[in-house]
Image: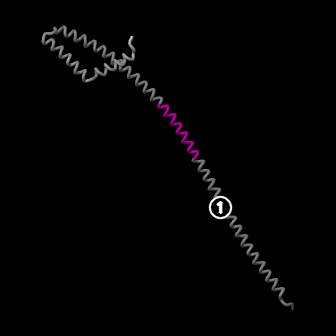
Amino acid sequence: MPDPRDIQRTALSITRVVGSPASIVLHTLVFAASFLAVTFDIIDFDRMLLILTTIVSLEAIYLAIFIQMTINYQAQSIAAVQEDVEEITEDVGAIQENVEELQENVEEISEGVEEMSEEEESEEATEERRKLEQKNTLENIETNLQRLIADIEHLKQTNQSKDTKPLL
């Protein structure tokens, strides 16, 4: 028994040939030759019609079978393509989920970086405030110290002037 794949390839080839312009020319020539054979008394008209009708009927039967085989082959091909499309759709869905997860991760990382930046800025601001407070405290101490030194100098001068005053 012949291999079904060989039969299918043959059916596809015949269907392609029958659907071509060459097939139209060939059929037109066969029909014209048949009627010319009757015109030149090579064959009887009834016999020519019987042979031509038989050939055309058999050709139609086989062409219908070949066309149906071609349709079945195309349906299988479409089913295979549809399965591939479904698989691709599933893969795209999975990829889309992965992209969404990655996007969420990127957002989380961005938020973490922002928090770290804010903390760093907050720490820097706190450090600046602390330094400013220290500077103000030092300036206050320095001012107080200068007043104290001035007061001590004033007291010294006052004491010296009391000591140097004559007694009455």
Give the percent coordinates (x, y) of residue 159.
82, 83
- Picture mark count: 1
Q: Which residue is mark 1?
A: 128
Write the residue at 16% across / 14% down: 35
Q: As drawn, which residue projects farthest toward the left? A: 40
Judge whether 4 appears above or below 85 on screen. above
**Quarter of the figure with the C terminus:** bottom right
Compared with 7, 115 (above or below) is below
Residue occupying the far bottom of the picture: 168
Quarter residue 52 falls in: top left
Front-lying residue, 36 or 93:
36
Q: Residue at x 67, y 64 (%)?
A: 132
Magenta-highlighted stretch: main secondary structure?
A: helix
What is the quadrant of residue 44 in the picture?
top left
| Left or right relative to 111: residue 164 | right
In the rendered image, residue 118, in percent from the top left (x then y), is placed at 61, 53
Q: Is residue 62 magenta?
A: no
Q: Amino acid at mark 1?
A: Glu
Question: Is residue 134 positioned above or below 93 on the image?
Answer: below
Residue at 39% across, 22% down: 75
Write down the region rendered in magenta. 88-109
Q: Is residue 65 above or below residue 77?
A: above
- Secondary structure at numbered mark 1: helix
Q: Tell me the quadrant of the picture where the N terminus can be found.
A: top left
Would residue 21 be found to the left or right of residue 90 on screen? left
Give percent across and percent down for residue 54.
Answer: 25, 10
Q: Is residue 99 magenta?
A: yes
Q: Residue at x 74, y 75 (%)?
A: 147
Look at the image and name its color scheme.
one colour
Looking at the image, the residue that sits furthest to the right is 168
Q: Report x, y in % for residue 21.
A: 25, 24
